[in-house]
Image (spheres, rainbow, N blue to C red):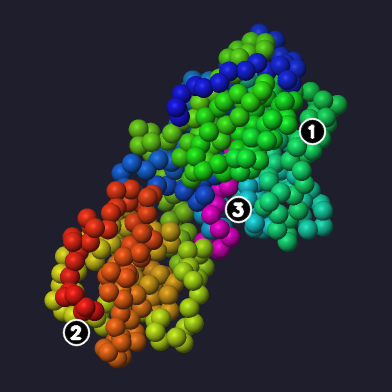
């Protein structure tokens, strides 16, 4: 069961070097696979995760013991200008939470090493990114392959790896196992360590296989595995995964003393954790950046399939054009929450966020549709064409019909998905907004 301590193991594989008087209790907290989820969107009340809750949880942990905070990678969702801006905001938030190292995941690697270097510099230039098996296109290693962190009287060796399946034209990825073994050997020769942790951004099958192949380490924490994996024993080590939009953190507990037993659990960041004031300030700053940048839909990773601008049949006309012939239907629609979807964003300040805009406007990224808050506010709110499709051709020639709701039902689930509308069922919800005569529109 997630959230419970599920596994115990001795730190014998690394050869503990500490003694009972020197080694103090230590908590290691590991996040991962945030996927741009800087804050729950709020479309439903039971959403978990977000940096604001993560910050509060880590603050609470630090009131108990020394805390080492790490991230397993996968912080962003895409590689667009909007995604990069959000990644920088997430990284700033992690820095405020005193993250020690951030492993490079698939989305980070997709940015390329040049972009990652620039982002690291924008964050103050302090080395942050970790990867033992990532190389640039010329074969030059990128990031720190490993680092020994001294905390609570212990020497913790942290290594980072990424699945080879995430290689691109800009980055090469070598064998995760060979990379880890090389770092272990180097540590044994040069520095010695008390605990060896691998942050591994690998799909579940590869993650479990790596765990079976690496009895030399103490802990492997990865993602993306679809669902979080609470710490479990795989041979002598602990395996866990912090994934699914960063909704779960992996917590490892090390008591004081030589050869301690390590316990772990997956902690879900539910609404029981209040919002961190410092993380709220970081979110507010991010929103200020978004307002200034005013990213166009084309500068995000949420664009629908490309449609030629000159194709009249696929251009948005706007709800105002519909009112000329469908006044009664529009008046009914005006009474529905959809017609005021933009205002719900304004209550939280998230109207500047493209992630939220895409489901609260008409024709996001579609020719003639919503472009950005400053450039197309007349396309704000969910209008007729959000369901009936681009209707410029229908406006110019009423004999050309738009899609009727029976055909448009599939469009509902683009926004009313399991994340945002877990109880959505078309047959139940459609009667609440039904309008028009059969065959009309």
Residue 360 showing in the rendered view: no
Separation (CA) of disc 3 from disc 1: 25 Å
Residue at image point 68% right, 51% down: 165
State yes or no: discs 2 and 1 in contact (Cβ < 8 Å).
Answer: no
- Label 1 sits on a secondary structure element that is helix
Looking at the image, is mark 3 or mark 1 earlier in the sequence?
A: 3
- Label 3 sits on a secondary structure element that is helix
Residue 107, disc: 3
> In the image, is residue 228 part of the stretch drawn in magenta?
no
Q: Is residue 273 above or below residue 11?
A: below
Q: Is residue 339 above or below residue 166?
A: below
Residue at image point 61% right, 14% down: 261
Q: Is residue 179 above or below residue 89?
A: above
Residue 349, disc: none
Would you name the residue on which mark 2 appears? 325
180, 426: nearer the viewer: 426
Q: Position of residue 219 (x, y in %)?
A: 65, 27
Question: In this image, 280 relative to 379: left or right?
Answer: right
Residue at image point 51% right, 36% down: 228
Quarter of the picture containing the C terminus is bottom left
Q: Which secondary structure class fits the magenta region best?
A: loop
Q: Position of residue 134 (x, y in %)?
A: 74, 48
Extent of the magenta region: 68-82
Q: Position of residue 1 (x, y in %)?
A: 44, 27
213, 124: nearer the viewer: 213
274, 230: nearer the viewer: 230
Instruction: For marks 3 and 2, give the one nearer the viewer.
Output: 2
Residue at image point 40% right, 64% down: 358
Separation (CA) of disc 3 from disc 2: 47 Å
Residue 181, disc: 1
Q: Is residue 124 above or below residue 188?
A: below
């Amino acid at each position: 069961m997630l959230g419970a301590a599920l596994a115990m193991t001795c730190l014998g594989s690394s050869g503990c070097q500490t003694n009972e008087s020197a080694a103090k209790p230590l908590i290691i907290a590991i996040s991962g696979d945030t996927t741009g989820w800087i804050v729950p969107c709020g479309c439903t009340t039971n959403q978990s995760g977000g940096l604001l809750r993560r910050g509060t949880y880590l603050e609470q942990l630090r009131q108990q013991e020394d805390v080492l905070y790490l991230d397993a990678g996968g912080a962003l969702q895409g590689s667009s200008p909007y995604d990069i801006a959000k990644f920088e905001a997430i990284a700033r938030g992690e820095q405020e939470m005193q993250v020690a190292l951030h492993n490079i995941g698939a989305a980070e690697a997709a940015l390329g090493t040049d972009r990652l270097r620039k982002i690291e510099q924008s964050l103050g230039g302090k080395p942050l990114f970790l990867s033992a098996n990532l190389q640039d296109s010329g074969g030059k290693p990128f990031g720190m392959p490993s680092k020994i962190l001294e905390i609570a009287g212990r020497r913790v060796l942290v290594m980072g790896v990424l699945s080879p399946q995430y290689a691109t034209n800009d980055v090469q990825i070598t064998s995760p196992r060979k990379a880890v073994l090389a770092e272990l050997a180097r540590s044994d020769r040069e520095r010695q360590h008390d605990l060896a942790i691998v942050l591994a951004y690998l799909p579940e099958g590869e993650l479990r296989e790596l765990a079976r192949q690496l009895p030399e380490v103490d802990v492997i924490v990865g993602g993306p595995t679809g669902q979080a994996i609470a710490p479990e024993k795989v041979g002598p080590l602990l395996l866990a995964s912090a994934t699914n939009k960063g909704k779960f953190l992996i917590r490892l507990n090390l008591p004081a003393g030589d050869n301690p037993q390590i316990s772990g659990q997956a902690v879900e960041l539910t609404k029981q954790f209040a919002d961190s004031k410092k993380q709220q300030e970081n979110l507010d700053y991010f929103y200020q950046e978004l307002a200034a940048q005013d990213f166009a839909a084309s500068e995000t990773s949420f664009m629908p399939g490309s449609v030629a601008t000159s194709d009249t049949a696929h251009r948005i006309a706007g709800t105002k054009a519909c009112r000329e012939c469908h006044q009664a239907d529009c008046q009914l629609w005006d009474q529905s929450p959809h017609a005021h979807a933009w205002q719900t964003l304004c209550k939280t300040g998230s109207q500047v966020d493209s992630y939220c805009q895409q489901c609260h406007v008409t024709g996001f990224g579609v020719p003639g549709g919503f472009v950005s808050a400053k450039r197309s506010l007349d396309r704000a709110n969910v209008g007729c064409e959000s369901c009936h499709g681009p209707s410029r051709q229908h406006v110019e020639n009423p004999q050309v019909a738009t899609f009727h709701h029976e055909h448009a039902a599939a469009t509902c689930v683009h926004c009313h998905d399991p994340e945002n509308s877990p109880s959505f069922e078309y047959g139940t919800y459609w009667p609440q907004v039904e309008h028009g005569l059969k065959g009309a529109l």
